[in-house]
Image: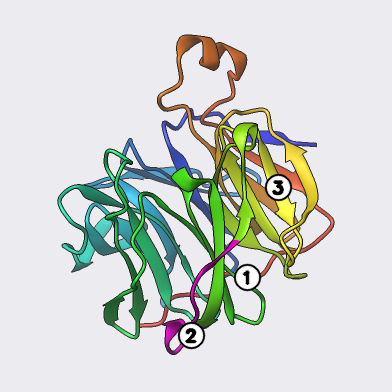
Amino acid sequence: MIQKIWKGPALLGESPLWDHRTGFLYWIDIENSKLYWQKVDGSDYSSMDLPAPVGSIALWHDGGLIAAMGQGLFLIEPDLGAVTPIEPELADDNCLMNDGKADRAGNFIFGAKHLRECAPVAGSWRYQSSQISPLEQKFIVFNGPAFNPAGDKIYFANSPTQQIMTASYSPAEGITSQPEVFVQLTGKDGYPDGMTVDSEGYLWNAQWDGWAITRYRPDGTIDQKIDMPVQRPTSLCFGGEDLKTLFVTSASTRLSPKELAENPDAGGLFQLDVPVAGLPEKPIIQ
């Protein structure tokens, strides 16, 4: 059963993040420059205005969050309401930061999107032990990424191409092989957005304009497709004490009045119980 646990609506809900250290669930609204957090039962709900659109967040090693925000990288301390720049100017003027995630060793992999979503010029980077290094790949819209349980494979999407890509990955060196197409979506499948990997090594992907989230086997074939009550699911994460609760964000932005009438829950936050556990997110090391 899919349950809406926050009605929002977010314009562009994204980057759900379970903090296993504190039992808090975090998520963002990119277009409203907002950060939200609460316990699973809805208690201790709070929010924070941010100084720029935030594309993604990950756990920081001693509490708080690292954020790909605006055109750079920042540290957010929700308890203090504080935002501290790490490197505020990384992306080009025609780009904004988008998706990102910790690898299995505690490095932050993140990328940007072209504002008009028509040119593959958006960069991607890796934060490792206080050093930021650019990755070779350029994107129209960088989404994902996700890592297999062993940490030696990365998945990511260049969303407008409807492709999920995969490559070999080393926590010490980054992407170490030429990326290959893992899944090619078509037509009504929608566009691959945020993703995560479960403890069995299967990839879960939220599919923008596809009304669904899909679980893929390690060979790229579909294991399970779950219909969602919203047209634009955006990202997902595992959480809860046993990591068997799937949290899914969604968007209401750029929908026509007719489309909004067809999915009135657009922009909400959802949860559903699944039979397989996820993996705890690794805090980013400094």
- Would you say residue 40 is visible in this rendering? no
Quadrant of residue 59 within the rendered picture: bottom left
Q: Residue furthest toward the right?
A: 275
Q: Amino acid at mark 2?
A: Pro
Residue 85 image offset from top left, x and y in percent: 20, 65
139 in magenta: no
Q: Is residue 272 left or right of residue 34?
A: right
Which x, y percent locates residue 107?
Answer: 43, 78
- Answer above or below: position of 261 versus 81: above
Q: Cα distance, mark 2 to mark 1?
A: 17 Å
Few, some or many residues within 10 Å of mark 1 (<14, 14–19, 20+): some
Range of residues picked out in magenta: 170-181
First-in-chain label (1 vs 3):
3
Q: Residue at x 40, y 24 (%)?
A: 254
Q: Residue at x 55, y 33 (%)?
A: 232
Which mark is first along the chain, 2 or 3?
2
> Which badge, 2 or 1, is on the more N-terminal residue?
2
Which element is circle 2 on?
A: loop
Q: Which residue is mark 1?
A: 280
* Residue 108 image point, x, y percent: 41, 72
Residue ID for mark 2: 171
Mark 1 residue type: Pro
Q: Residues within 10 Å of mark 2 (few under 14, many from 20)?
A: some
Q: Do the numbered discs 1 and 3 sit on residues whose CB atoms are within 8 Å?
A: no
User: Where residue 223 sits: x, y (%)?
Assistant: 81, 53
